[in-house]
Image: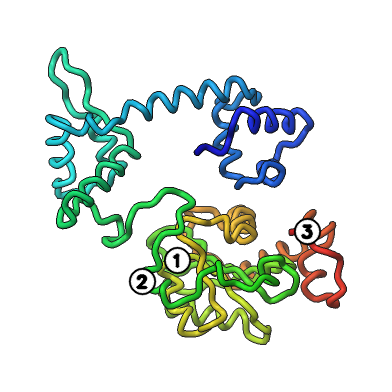
Amino acid sequence: MAFFTPEKRIQLETLRQAGMRAAAELSRQLGCCPRTVERELDRCAGKRYNAYRAGLDRQRCAARSAANVVVKTQGELLLQLYGLFDEPQRLSPEGVSLMLGRLPRAAGKPRLSLSTPAVYAWLKRERMSDPSCVLWRGRSGTRTTTRHGAKGRDTGWAAKAQSISERPERANRRLERNHLECDTLWGRQRDEHRLLVILDRKSRYVRLGTFKKSAIATAIGAQSLLKGSTLKTLTCDRGAEFARLPQFFKDKLFVCHAYRADERGSCENVNRWLREFFPRGRSMDSYSDDYVAQVQDFINRRPRKILNGLTPYEIHFSSPRSPTVRT
């Protein structure tokens, strides 16, 4: 069921008229993730948000989705689907949906087309009817397809770590320091190094370092950045670069659910700031350690509204009776 009902749209329009613009603030008021709010605002095509106009756009989208019925995957369209998935290029469902719209059509016949969700649904039905028929295994060869927000299955190295659902409540509520999140940033795909970002959940204090992009180098780099600190928990995503962390941090490591970047929201927010200093497309190998240290110092000494005007440096190195941090 869609989150935005007519009542929710009217509430969103009222909040916008009251001067609330940031998606993060709107999501807190409405009780959803910021990306859901951004998608809803996009329904008005960049114009002033209007609940009625957004509702009309939702009805048009529903009408297009309703056209992707099961009956359509028969006859000529069914042959086209099997043919495209058998191509040597190993097309993804997104690629198959795009190619269907580009195939030549006979005179007087409608164009064969299916949306990407309809292709995923067809693949699922094919697996259920014939488990040995696997037309697409995912980009990694084993990953199953799930919608955004799904928890996915614990496969691969993530099965050796604890789920974020088991993380202590004090870490979830940001009641004490040394509960950390980590992520990596890359400049170009062929670079030898990645930027490792480790953030304290309470103080938002950031540690940065450039290390080789292998899993063992990332684990050793995390240990070197955390040297001298008392680690309580460390939360990461399911990226292959973190595959060796369970061997180094054992019961202190927690892994997010699949496709849930919002479970490391603080780290994702800081990554957006870091892109001002480490733009995508520029080689990460070109940055010196001094430059990385300067960026780290600048981010940690930048006042934060969520810290009541204090800096992460002041919160992290102050006494335990520091000002209350909003969650």
Residue 34 to residue 111: above or below: below
Q: CA distance from mark 3 to mark 2?
A: 35 Å
**Are there few (<14), some (14-19), or many (20+) residues within 10 Å of tag 1?**
some
Name the residue at 87% across, 74% down.
321
Q: Is residue 120 left or right of residue 322?
A: left
Farthest top residue?
108
Callout 3 amino acid: Arg
Farthest bottom residue?
228
Query: Which label belongs to residue 326?
Result: 3
Q: CA distance from mark 2 to mark 1?
A: 9 Å
Callout 2 amino acid: Gly
Query: Would residue 290 be seen by someone viewing this image from the given angle?
Result: no
Q: Are marks 2 and 1 in contact (CB under 8 Å)?
A: yes
Q: Which quadrant of the view contains residue 125?
A: top left
Q: Secondary structure at mark 2?
A: helix
Residue 262 to residue 166: above or below: above
Q: Which residue is mark 2?
A: 156
Q: Which residue is mark 1?
A: 238
Callout 1 amino acid: Arg
Q: Secondary structure at mark 3?
A: loop
Residue 86 position within the rendered picture, expressed as x and y whole percent measured from the top left: 14, 47
Q: Which quadrant of the view contains residue 154?
A: bottom left
Residue 102 position within the rendered picture, expressed as x and y whole percent measured from the top left: 23, 29
Name the residue at 39% across, 74% down.
157
